[in-house]
Image (cartoon, rainbow, N blue to C red):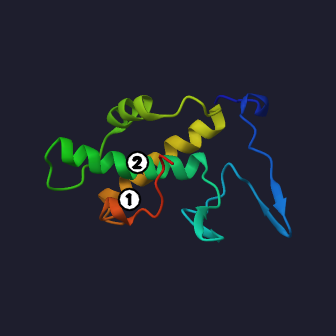
Amino acid sequence: MSFSSRSNEVPPPPLEKIGDLVYSPGTDLPFGKRIRIGLSEQTIYESAVEHGYRTGIRAHFTFIEDHECSNPVPLDDKQFTMIIEHLVPTNLNAFEQGLWRSHFIAGWMGVYLGLVTDEDDMDTDIDK
C-alpha cells in the first residue's frame, strides 16, 4: 500500500466573505447567476469549475457537429485526455486545472445524458 504525504497535495483556495456569506471564489459556483447592476446584467463571477463545465458542453456540441453524429458521444479515458490536454487553460494553477478537468467531463456527460439538450441552454458566454 502506498502512502502519500499531505504536503504533496495542492491546497484549496482561500475562502472569502461578503457580509455573512462565506464562499470560495475559485470553486463555489453561481452557474451563470446574474445580477442586475444599473441597466445591465453581469455574471457575479466565473470560476475554473464553471468554465470547465461550460467548455465541456460546448466541446461536445462541436464534436457532434464536426463528426456529423446524430447522438451524443461518450468518450473513454484516452479520448478525454487528448481533448482536455488541448483545451485546458494554461493560466490556471494545478488545483484549478484539476477542477476544470473534472467539470469539463461533467459538462460533456451532461450533454450525453440529455441534461443539456442545446448549447443555447447555457446562460452565459464563457468567452467574455
Q: Which residue is mark 1?
A: 110
Could you tell me which secondary element the residue under label 2 belongs to? helix
**Location of residue 28 (image quadrant):** bottom right
Within 10 Å of the Cα at label 1, are there few (<14), some (14-19), or many (20+) other Cα atoms?
Answer: some
Horizontally, residue 29 falls left or right of residue 115, namely: right
Identity, as a three-letter code, of the amino acid under mark 2: Gly
20 to 113, vertically: above or below: below
**Quarter containing the N terminus:** top right
Q: Nearer the viewer, mark 1 or mark 2?
A: 2
Q: Residues within 10 Å of mark 2 (few under 14, many from 20)?
A: many
Instruction: Kindly check if marks 1 and 2 are in contact, taking CB atoms under 8 A apart as contact.
Output: yes
Q: CA distance from mark 1 to mark 2?
A: 9 Å
Residue 79 on image: x %, y %: 32, 34
Residue under label 2, please give it. Answer: 56
**For the view shown, which residue lies furthest in the front direction?**
39
Residue 104: x and y in percent read 45, 46
Q: Is residue 39 above or below residue 107?
A: below
Q: Relative to 39, does residue 118 appear above or below in the rendering?
A: above
What residue appears at the point 73 percent right and 54 percent down from the top-left corner? 24
Mark 1 residue element? helix
The x, y position of residue 96, in whole percent, is 62, 40
Q: Which sits in the foreground, 38 or 28?
A: 38
The answer to which image quadrant residue 13 occupies is: top right
Foreground pick, 91 / 6: 91
